[in-house]
Every structure is written in C-alpha cells, then in structure tokens.
Image: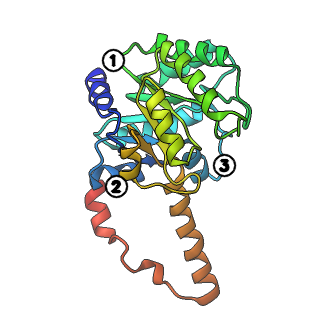
Amino acid sequence: MTNDRAAIFLALHQPGAGFVLPNAWDGGSARILEQVGFAAIATTSAGIAFSLGRADAHMTGSEMLDCIATIVEAVDCPVTADLESGYGATPDHVADTVTRALEIGVVGGNLEDAIEPGELIPVEAGRERVEAARSSAPKGSFVLNARTDTYMTKHPDAFAETIRRAEQYVAAGADCIFVPGVSDADEIGRLTAEIDAPVNVVAGLVEPVLDAATLRELGVARISIGGTLTRAALTLVQNAGREMLERGTFSFADGAIPYGEFQQRFS
C-alpha cells in the first residue's frame, strides 16, 4: 500500500507540472486541505513547531515524527514529511529517521543540507546523508526530496553551487531537488533546465511571490508553501485577538465554517 501511494505521489513530479503541494501542521489542517481537493499533502516543520509555541528547528526527531503521524492518520491521501536535516549528526541517524518515517506511513520526505541554521554542510557530507536516506527507503517506496539551502544561506554563487549539489544528490538517489529561497524567474528557469531531476520551489517564502502558472512555465515540477499557511492562520488569530481586546467586536467570525459542519467533516 505504501509503495502504491509513493508511486502515485512520484508520478505528480513532472517538469513543468507545477503541482501545488500544501503544507499542513496538524490533523485538522490536513483534513481540510484534503477536503478542498489536494491530491497529496506535505507537513511543515516550521508550522508544526509554531503551532506548539516553539521556534522552528527546536524539536527532536521523536517529537516531530509523533506530530507527523497524527497528520498521516487524519487523511487518506499521500503525505510527505518535512524531516529537516534528518535529526542527527551522522548518516546513520538520517537512515534511522527515514526508517521511522516509513513506519508511520509517509510516502516521502525532505532532507536538508544545512544542519546548523545558515550553514551548509560540505557537499560530500550532504551526498552521504542522501545515500543513507535512500538506503533505508529504496526507490519506489519513498519520494526523496533533497533540499539544498544555497539560496537560503546566501551562498556567493548560489546558482553554480545548487547545480553542483543537485548533481551529487541525484547521483546519490534523490528523486527531486528542493531549492527554497530562489525567487528570480530567470534563475528558476535556468535551474530547471540544468538540474536533471524534478525541481521543487517554495511560494510565499521570499519576494517576489510568483504564481503557479508562472512557475509551471519555468519548468517547476512541485510547488510547496512551507510554513506560509500556518503563518497566515496564526496571523488571523493575532488580528482576531487584537480586535476582541481593543474593540470588543467579533467580525473575524463572519464567514467561519459553522461548528456543526466541522463536526460532520471530522466525524
């Protein structure tokens, strides 16, 4: 069953398909997104942390996997997990994390090459970690999305370094290359032309925010939103709180899905 779902998910990754993959942070948000009609859902490490009142990259692997499991259990569609940098200093730790992710039923996962925020690990170490992930989850059983933070860390030659790392990660078994932080349309088009694998970018993380149609024209296969939807939801909570406290009004309730409908949807 997991292999079938992984194959379905992998089939979405076609250059230029630009399928939108929303990122859920709990079972409720995941179920709503599935009911909207998305064919697959991703988790967001930032969103999960924020929803628990924690900063991003401040959760253990066990804590994160427990949260991911609640999302997988809430929906029928394939779920791919944000596994950050693999929750450990060594490739063996990465392999163990991927094994545990498979056990809870995810069909894929992201793996970062910046263990410490803002600091890329050597490309050789990044390749070893991708190889370790692949060893725990053979092709066909898990869609391995190798993330490189060349743009997030403001590498002085981000384009060339992205291509160099992408080549190594694809050779190590990655199914897709994830490049967050790139926003220039011409740069994105050059990346999709040079990388011999489907390319994943994030919408809403940096300016300008390109729409899905533009990203498809540029050859992007997969469009994530990271923690953006969580941030939007928590911004609504902040604004509603200010309205109640400062004005004593409740206009934020206008248009909200009724209680009874939630009961039916979540039963």
Q: Left or right? Give the position of 263 relative to 236.
A: left
Residue at left offset 29%, top offset 55%: 36
Proximity of marks 2 and 3: CB atoms separated by less than 8 Å? no
- Judge whether residue 68 can be spotted in this image: no
Proximity of marks 3 and 1: CB atoms separated by less than 8 Å? no
Q: In the image shown, does 189 or 234 lie closer to the viewer? A: 189
Q: Give amino acid for label 3.
A: Arg
Callout 2 secondary element: helix
Please state the horizontal and vertical placement of residue 82, each as a whole percent of the image: 51, 35
Residue at left offset 59%, top offset 75%: 241
- The structure's colour scheme is rainbow
Please state the horizontal and vertical placement of residue 225, each as a whole percent of the image: 48, 49
Q: What residue is pinned by disc 3?
A: 54
- Judge whether residue 240 can be spotted in this image: yes
Quarter of the figure that contains the C terminus: bottom left
Residue at left offset 36%, top offset 45%: 216
Q: Left or right? Give the position of 17 relative to 151.
A: left
Task: Check disc 2: other Cα within 10 Å, few if <14, some if 14-19, many if 20+.
Answer: some
- Spatial CA span between label 2 and label 3: 23 Å
Please state the horizontal and vertical placement of residue 85, each as a whole percent of the image: 61, 28
Q: What residue is pinned by disc 1?
A: 140
Q: Which of the numbered marks, if any, corresponds to residue 32?
A: 2
Q: Give amino acid for label 2.
A: Ile
Task: Check disc 3: other Cα within 10 Å, few if <14, some if 14-19, many if 20+.
Answer: few
Please state the horizontal and vertical placement of residue 122, each as a whole percent of the image: 70, 19
Residue at left offset 65%, top offset 44%: 56
Q: Which of the numbered marks, if any, corresponds to residue 3?
A: none
